[in-house]
Image (tube, rainbow, N blue to C red):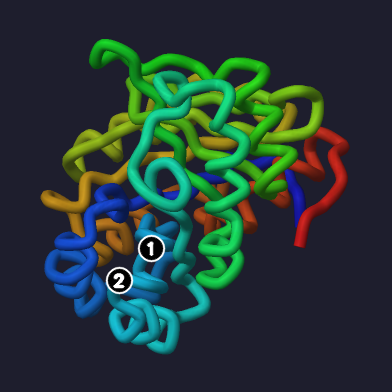
Amino acid sequence: KLENKIYVTFVMSEGDNLQYDQHRLRKLWDDPGRGKVPITWTASPLLADAAPAMLNYYQQTATPNDLLIAGPSGAGYFYPSPWPDDTFGAFLKQSKPYLKRTGMTIPYILNRVSHNDVPLTEAEAQAYIDQLDPPGVFLNWGSRFGVTILNGSLPQSSVRGSGSVQEVKNILAEAAAGWDGESPLFLSLGVLAWSMTPSDLANIAESLGPQFEVVRGDQYFQLIREAYGLKKKH
């Protein structure tokens, strides 16, 4: 139910990396804190071809608090803006079967030019809408968070990156201090997979006040869609 709360989704990094999916992700997956708090896990949709047994393991052992989404920036690691415009839509069209087969229908997009984060162009946003039709997209790994509705229909949540428990607590405290309580606030918080664990996130969630609610990425975008009067996606 949509309320006047600060909605937080924890987005775990590194999922585009097949070696990470094989090793570090499995270690995090075995952490005793997994399942105690909603976590949005990035993974590679290409596991469907590259390592279907690994993908099957994560899917079969996921708890109701675990959600797998497509690591940057769809089927395979790429930046949209450097990709040639005349084939970008075709590539996303080829990517869609992987996202559909794996259930990773939410893309986490990294978009960089000369080592700098850049926004999606209107044409790139429209290509995601036309070819993937996702419920929402996460963007980049920066020092700010915020929600933008791309092309009038696609929710985009800028990811606020973090690398430690204390940094996460500081970000959440700042968000609470700046919130007027008059309408919902949405915060996607990037979690560095090399330095934080599900147990860390569970402990953080337990320390939060009643104005916070931690949700999975799919719930997060459905709440955003309701808050902004957009059509729901299933």
Between 70 and 187, the one nearer to me in the picture: 70
Determine whether 216 is above or below 2 in the image: below
Residue 50: image tag: 2
Q: Position of residue 198 (x, y in %)?
A: 27, 64
Q: Position of residue 11 (x, y in %)?
A: 39, 49
Q: Which residue appears at 47% of the width and 58% of the height?
A: 69
Determine whether 51 is above or below 19 in the image: below
Q: Which residue appears at 35% of the width and 80% of the height?
A: 52
As shown in the figure, which amino acid type bears the numbered disc 2? Ala
Quadrant where the C terminus is found in the figure: bottom right
Q: Which residue appears at 66% of the width and 29% of the height?
A: 181
Whether residue 222 is visible to the viewer of this picture, yes or no, is yes
Quadrant of the image occupied by residue 182: top right
As shown in the figure, which amino acid type bears the numbered disc 1? Leu
Q: Position of residue 3 (x, y in %)?
A: 74, 47
Determine whether 168 is above or below 56 in the image: above
- Mark 1 sits on what residue? 46
Give the side of residue 22 with respect to residue 116, left or right: left
User: Dots 1 and 2: beta carbons under 8 Å?
Assistant: yes
